[in-house]
Image (cartoon, coloured by chain):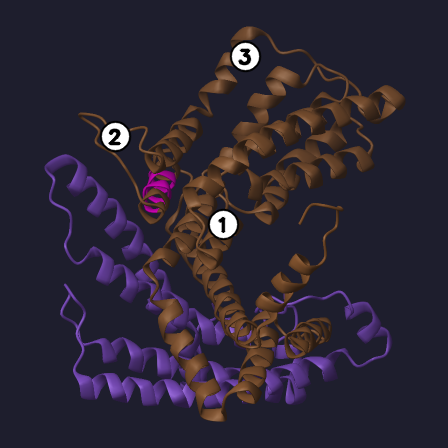
Chain colours: A purple, B brown
């Protein structure tokens, strides 16, 4: 991690680290929660009532906080069998740009639809069974992060065109 | 049925063109579903799956098992496993390669991934085998073969995902992996013996360890064994007696495993704050990539089911009787 000197650099650094920190924190909490729940249940027969609700909430946070950066870095699971051929034909970057554009564009519609579904949950006023947290909070979060993932993929395509060295060594 | 087959072909083509597997399946599933129903219906189906999959309680087993494997790895347990199996097997011809196989089996018992098993063991075992002049072909082959034990011996992330996708009991799948896993170890050991029998120079024998050294080496791995029995025993209700009363669901087993591995690594002072953060970040990223694939797979399977491919295939295979008089 480089020290951020300018404001834009600080913004980029935050955009990268904040979601990752959120995902890591949620994951750590998930581990502690499961452990505590089992311990309380087996020793004093007092399980945490809202453990299942909280688990589901934390899962959504882990998965969707990590998704944009994962996609931006091109680390989604893919098959690289033909990479040699692409490299020989000198179209490797072209292929990567097309793939990023394709994925980003196709994700926009479902992402917008997730917003609709979240709005619908909000109008129904559904709440989690034990945690009593309104369901639409999580759904808004998922909707926003899905859209951010789509934008991250499009941004990846742009970066691959204008500044490919920024992304080099990051595709796995 | 034709639509389903075209769908499979399209997914394969996209995947070969380097489209991430999740997006290839999701795209083909979405477009196919659109042709079968409507644009709105297809988009809604995908959106619903995006929301529901990430909040599936059963799926929380995935990140927790990954976390357990990574913590164990940071705790330096792979090195100790290798040292222990080496103390017992190292003096045989091809002994280091055999020790690699056994250590892979041990590592597989706490890690659910073949890739992680192979990657970890190559870091630990490869330099050692090079030092004793082992043929690279024998050493790499034994690591690669040993790595396959990762998904076979429980816990196994792949079996968990398979179980969740097909609604098969994860506990039963894990049990089903144990015997093939041990058979795998056994036959890989025979394979090493066979290759050093043919070319003895490929795997020279190392020095013999005394019994005191052997027991000292075993002391390093007892924690791993304990963790394995806690996780797998709890999962099968083998520990459900007073005063333990430990019976886990797969998610709880994974959570206990992750916490146990975390504590072991902490107790050995092998885990800095930096390491802990690295492990958490890596697990989150891996989890997100697996969930993307899961969502894509569910979208695609919704389309394939809608197109009636499974039914058609079942009908076909019923219509053909492969053996006369048996159908």
Residue A22 position, x and y percent, is 33, 68
- Provide the chain ID for the residue under circle 2: B
* Magenta segment: B255-263
Residue occupying the far front of the picture: B325
Dot 2 surroundings within 10 Å: few (below 14), some, or many (20 or more)? some
In this rendering, the answer to whether B305 lies above or below A109 is above
Image-based side of B84 in relation to A169, left or right: left
Whole-angstrom CA distance, mark 1 to mark 3, is: 35 Å
The number of numbered discs placed on residues in the rendered structure image is 3
Closer to viewer: mark 1 or mark 3: 1
Mark nearer the N terminus (1 vs 3): 1
Please state which of the two labelled residues, at mark 3 or mark 2, is closer to the viewer: 2
Q: Which numbered marker is on residue B240?
A: 2
Residue B213: image tag? 3
Q: Name the subunit of mark 1.
A: B
Secondary structure of residue under mark 1 = helix
Residue displayed at 59% across by 22% down: B85
Percent x, y of residue B194: 81, 23
Does residue B242 sit above or below B288 in this rendering? above
Task: Pinpoint residue B82: horizontal percent, then vertical percent.
Answer: 59, 28
- Residue at x-position 24% and y-position 52%: A33
**Distance (Cα) linking label 1 and label 2:** 24 Å
Badge 1 vs badge 2, beta-carbon distance below 8 Å: no
Q: Are marks 3 and 2 on the same chain?
A: yes
Q: Which residue is mark 1?
A: B157
The CA distance from mark 3 to mark 2 is 36 Å
Disc 3 to disc 2: CB gap under 8 Å: no
Does the segment drawn in magenta span residue B256?
yes
Q: Main secondary structure of the magenta part?
A: helix
Q: Indicate yes or no whether the magenta region holds residue B251.
A: no
Element at label 2: loop
Decide which of A123, B227 is in the foreground and name it: A123
């Amino acid at each position: 991690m480089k020290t951020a000197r300018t404001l834009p650099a600080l913004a980029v650094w935050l955009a990268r680290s904040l979601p990752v920190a959120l995902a890591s924190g949620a994951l750590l909490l998930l581990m502690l929660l499961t452990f505590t729940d089992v311990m309380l249940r087996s020793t004093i027969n007092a399980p945490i009532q809202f453990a299942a609700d909280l688990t589901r909430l934390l899962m959504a946070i882990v998965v969707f906080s990590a998704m944009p950066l994962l996609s931006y870095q091109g680390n989604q699971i893919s098959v690289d069998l033909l990479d040699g051929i692409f490299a020989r034909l000198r179209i490797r970057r072209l292929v990567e740009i097309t793939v990023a554009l394709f994925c980003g564009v196709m994700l926009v519609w479902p992402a917008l639809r997730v917003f609709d579904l979240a709005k619908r949950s909000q109008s129904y006023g559904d709440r989690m069974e034990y945690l009593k947290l309104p369901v639409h909070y999580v759904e808004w979060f998922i909707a926003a992060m899905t859209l951010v993932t789509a934008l991250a993929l499009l941004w990846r395509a742009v970066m691959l065109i204008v500044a490919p060295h920024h992304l080099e060594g990051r595709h796995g | 049925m034709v639509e389903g087959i075209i769908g499979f072909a399209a997914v394969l083509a996209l995947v070969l063109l380097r489209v991430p597997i999740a997006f290839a399946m999701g795209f083909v599933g979405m477009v196919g579903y659109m042709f079968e129903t409507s644009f709105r219906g297809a988009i809604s189906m995908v959106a619903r799956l995006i929301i529901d999959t990430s909040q599936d309680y059963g799926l929380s087993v995935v990140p927790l098992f990954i976390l357990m494997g990574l913590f164990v790895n940071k705790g330096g347990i792979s090195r100790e496993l290798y040292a222990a199996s080496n103390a017992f097997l190292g003096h045989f011809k091809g002994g280091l390669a055999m020790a690699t196989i056994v250590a892979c089996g041990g590592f597989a018992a706490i890690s659910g991934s073949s890739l992680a098993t192979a990657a970890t063991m190559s870091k630990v075992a490869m330099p050692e085998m090079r030092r004793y002049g082992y043929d690279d072909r024998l050493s790499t082959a034994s690591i690669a073969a040993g790595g396959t034990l990762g998904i076979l011996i429980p816990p196994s992330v792949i079996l968990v995902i398979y179980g969740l996708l097909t609604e098969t009991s994860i506990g039963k799948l894990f049990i089903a992996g144990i015997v093939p896993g041990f058979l795998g170890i056994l036959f890989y050991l025979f394979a090493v013996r066979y290759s050093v029998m043919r070319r003895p120079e490929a795997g020279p024998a190392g020095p013999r360890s005394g019994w005191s050294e052997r027991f000292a080496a075993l002391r390093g791995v007892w924690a791993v064994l304990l963790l394995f029995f806690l996780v797998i025993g709890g999962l099968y209700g083998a520990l459900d007696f007073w005063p333990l009363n430990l019976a886990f669901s797969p998610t709880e087993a994974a959570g206990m495993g992750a916490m146990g591995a975390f504590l072991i690594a902490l107790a050995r002072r092998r885990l800095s704050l930096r390491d802990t953060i690295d492990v958490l970040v890596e697990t989150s990223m891996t989890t997100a990539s697996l969930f993307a694939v899961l969502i894509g797979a569910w979208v695609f399977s919704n389309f394939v089911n809608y197109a009636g491919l499974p039914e058609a295939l079942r009908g076909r295979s019923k219509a053909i009787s492969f053996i006369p008089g048996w159908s």
